[in-house]
Amino acid sequence: MNALVSASRSWVRRSLTQPPSAAWTLAALGGCLAELSGAGPAPALTLAFGLVREAQRRGEPVAWISRTESTFFPPDAAAGGVDLAALPVILLDDVRHRLRAADRLARSGAFGLLVVDLGDRLDLPLAVQTRLAEQALAHGTLVLCLTEKTERQPSLGSLVAVRGQARCIRDGPDRFACRVHALKDKRRGPGWTDQEWCRGPDGVR
């Protein structure tokens, strides 16, 4: 825990010296434990795909850890520009197994981005947060937890550095804005928004 506190302070000092832009990008979020929530899965998945694309363009390995009943649909990911051949997807029903897999992958230091689908999980034990946040800071890995919850519900825990709430705004028959609103940001403060314009998949046009 002491190592995490020390690393977190260094991270905040660096961020204050060179504050990242207020944007939902891998470059701006950096290595940290983050959470992206949504009342439904679609906008959060779209925004997570954007981070996967960015990591893959940068040549950084990505892994996606999810549930067998997840709405992760490979054709949609491919249509969104994700290179599926370079994206290992790990499906585990037990949330404890998903978190254990995330911990092991984060400890390897080999990944630029780990996406962990936690479904309707409301919180994480402090010990789990500590391990994931430590590894994220140590290796510059963005550990992104996807959750299904409203913006009125709290984040997974105090060690989550950035929490965004995703929502989908229709702007035409097949045009959407997937918008993220920062509910929590330990470096830049909450309140900023970012969005990605996209076309809906065939089933929702």
Image (cartoon, rainbow, N blue to C red):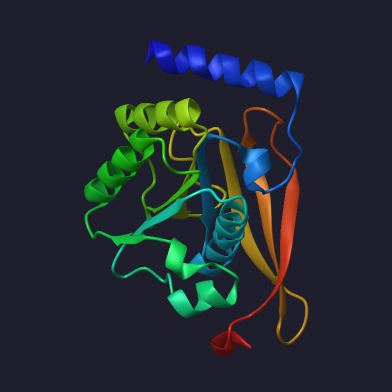
Residue 133 is situated, as x and y percent measured from the top left of the image, at: 44, 30
**Location of residue 166 with respect to 125 vertically, above or below:** below
Task: Between residue 150 and residue 61, name the one nearer to us.
Answer: 61
Report the residue at 57% width, 14% height from top.
9
Q: Position of residue 125 (x, y in %)?
A: 31, 33
* Residue 65 at x, y percent in the picture: 36, 55
Residue 103's image quarter?
A: top left
Q: Is residue 138 left or right of residue 195?
A: left
Q: Position of residue 131 (x, y in %)?
A: 35, 29
Q: How many marks?
A: 0
Instruction: Name which residue lies at 41% across and 13% down.
Output: 3
Name of the residue lying farthest toward the front: 59
Residue 158 visible somewhere in the drawing = no
> What residue appears at the point 58 percent right and 65 percent down from the top-left corner?
46
Residue 144 against residue 176 in the figure, above or below: above
| Residue 49 placement: quadrant | bottom right
Q: Quadrant of the C terminus?
A: bottom right
- Residue 39 in view (yes/no): yes
Q: In what quadrant of the picture does the N terminus appear?
A: top left
Q: Is residue 66 above or below residue 35?
A: below
